[in-house]
């Protein structure tokens, strides 16, 4: 084992880490907001529910890689897009990758959140209605907080999955951890050492994320502490 | 403030007129008239499925009846013929009415993600918009009153059923309601926990609170109420002072119901 090379590689890859985190955090944030909107659309009536179904079908049913390619290589073919104010963004691989990640994450998160909403005890909502809470206050103070707590264990998987999915951004030239790894491999042909380094970086990150989310779970639902394995 | 002297005079706390409610083809309430004046304690009794819960839930419009008029805590909602949904003005009136009524459910329905104290101040702060410090002080006094001062920071999931129901009663009281509505408050409890909840409700009756109580605890109902209402298949079959309804009912059905329940329970 060439430890000097390994540590050199490790630091090179680390340079891409901020971009990896950036993509993960922003796609989760954007996806989370979209997921909430999708659930509100679903609650709004038949049309909204069909739209949410179709959206989830579309983005969960096709590979993320294809979605990234379609946005990056595909959108530029439409003159309407090229002439719109969005073009300065959509011509950039960063924004295309981020958009694809957000749209994809929204589909999964919407389903997770839907499960959370379904698990909110009917009686808790009714008690809120009975004391005169408006729909918005109910959502903000009761339904959403309870739904989020119910959904958190499942959402933890989604966070980890999204974190790893940022690797696909390397396919459209982004130099995040995997992008740098691929570039290093073509320069040195030392694939095993370099990709192992990258894998370790992802492993350590997901370990930390898992821990942090577990902590958040007990923080938000202290009454479950001890009841859970 | 308590007492029968007020009855029959002034504006009632709650008055229902011609309430009809259908679920699909099933007519559950077939024209109910009922009034509760300030200080009244009304026991609502009847066989399972006779429509007691539905009637009670129609007051704060947790169920929207097909017809009738509801006057409660100073708000009037009159349903027009064939009206499917409440209009904006009616919804606003319902919202205002609800903040002035306390509802206690059979299954407690505490908010699981809030501590006992937070459950109590949630609506006063976030619905009534009152200052938080004031609400906390009142909530602490209410917890004292229901005997749960030391559970202030406990989670609902860590309380017994009897304790949860007492918190739920305190939560209803925190709204400073004009009247309290109880839907079988002890039916979900283990027998040994029933007493502690009934004791709290009895205390409220002695304070002169206006209450409508759906219950199968006949002995308790007879003691605390000043008026009993017997519901049968969506109609009021018998109503009157407790001595009449519980001891000497005119209707045969009420007689059969009451005697079977007294034999069963006490
Ligand atoms: N949400 C509902 N949908 C359909 N039927 C209902 C609903 N709520 C109550 N019912 C029916 O209405 C009747 C009266 O119910 P309820 O008011 O709960 O009676 P009680 O409280 O006296 O036992 C029952 O036959 C019940 O099945
Ligand atoms: Mg009932």
Image: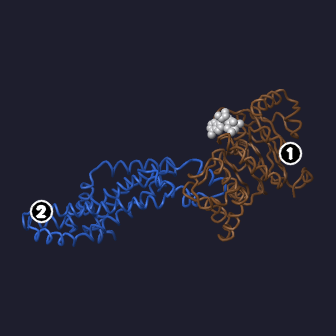
Chain colours: A blue, B brown
> What distance separates the C-alpha of mark 1 from that of mark 2?
85 Å
What x and y, as percent, mark residue A228? 43, 51
Q: Evaluate whether residue A68 shows in this view.
A: yes
Residue at 24% in and 54% down: A66
B84 relative to B158 in the view: left or right: right
User: Residue B79, relative to residue B21: is it above or below?
Assistant: below
Q: Quadrant of ligand 2?
A: top right
Residue to which mark 2 is pinned? A193
Horizontal relation, residue A214 to residue A201: left or right = right
Viewer-nearest residue: B221 or B181: B221
Residue where numbered disc 1 is placed: B226
Is residue A166 shown left or right of residue B126? Answer: left
Q: Are marks 1 and 2 in contact (CB under 8 Å)?
A: no
Q: Residue at x 65, y 32 (%)?
A: B25
Provide the chain ID for the residue under circle 2.
A
Give the image location of residue B26, x and y in percent: 67, 32
Query: Residue B234: x and y, percent?
Result: 75, 35
């Amino acid at each position: 084992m060439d430890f000097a090379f390994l540590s050199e590689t490790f630091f090179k890859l680390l340079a891409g880490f901020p971009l990896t985190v950036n993509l993960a955090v922003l796609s989760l944030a954007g996806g989370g907001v979209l997921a909430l909107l999708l659930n509100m659309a679903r609650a709004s009536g038949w049309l909204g529910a069909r739209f949410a179904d179709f959206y989830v079908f579309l983005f969960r049913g096709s590979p993320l890689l294809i979605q990234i390619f379609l946005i990056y290589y595909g959108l530029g073919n439409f003159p309407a897009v090229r002439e719109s104010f969005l073009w300065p963004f959509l011509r950039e691989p960063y924004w295309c990758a981020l958009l694809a990640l957000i749209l994809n994450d929204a589909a999964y998160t919407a389903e997770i959140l839907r499960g959370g909403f379904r698990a909110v005890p009917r009686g808790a909502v009714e008690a809120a209605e009975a004391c005169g809470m408006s729909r918005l206050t109910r959502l903000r103070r009761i339904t959403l907080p309870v739904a989020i707590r119910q959904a958190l264990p499942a959402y933890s998987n989604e966070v980890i999955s999204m974190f790893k999915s940022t690797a696909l951004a390397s396919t459209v030239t982004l130099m995040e951890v995997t992008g740098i790894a691929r570039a290093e491999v073509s320069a040195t042909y030392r694939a095993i050492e370099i990709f192992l380094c990258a894998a370790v970086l992802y492993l350590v990150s997901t370990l930390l994320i898992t821990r942090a989310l577990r902590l958040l779970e007990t923080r938000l639902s202290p009454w479950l502490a001890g009841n859970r394995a | 403030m308590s007492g029968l002297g007020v009855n029959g005079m002034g504006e009632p706390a709650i008055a229902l007129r011609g309430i009809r409610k259908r679920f699909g083809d099933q007519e559950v309430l077939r024209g109910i008239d009922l009034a509760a004046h300030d200080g009244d304690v009304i026991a609502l009794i009847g066989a399972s499925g006779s429509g007691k819960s539905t009637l009670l839930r129609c007051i704060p419009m947790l169920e929207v009846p097909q017809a009738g008029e509801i006057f409660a805590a100073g708000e009037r909602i009159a349903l027009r013929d064939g009206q499917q949904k409440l209009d904006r003005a009616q919804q606003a009136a319902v919202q205002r009415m609800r903040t002035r009524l306390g509802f206690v459910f059979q299954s407690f329905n505490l908010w699981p993600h809030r501590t006992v104290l937070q459950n109590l101040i949630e609506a006063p702060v976030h619905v009534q918009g009152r200052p938080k410090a004031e609400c906390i002080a009142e909530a602490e006094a209410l917890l004292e009153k229901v005997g749960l001062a030391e559970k202030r920071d406990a989670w609902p999931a860590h309380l017994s059923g009897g304790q949860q129901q007492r918190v739920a009663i305190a939560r209803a009281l925190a709204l400073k309601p004009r009247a309290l509505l109880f839907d079988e408050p002890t039916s979900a409890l283990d027998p040994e926990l029933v007493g502690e909840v009934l004791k709290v409700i009895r205390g409220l009756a002695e304070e002169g609170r206006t209450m409508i109580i759906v219950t199968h605890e006949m002995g308790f109902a007879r003691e605390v109420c000043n008026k009993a209402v017997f519901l049968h298949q969506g109609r009021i079959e018998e109503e009157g002072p407790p001595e009449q309804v519980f001891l000497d009912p005119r209707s045969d059905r009420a007689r059969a119901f009451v005697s079977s329940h007294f034999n069963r329970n006490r």
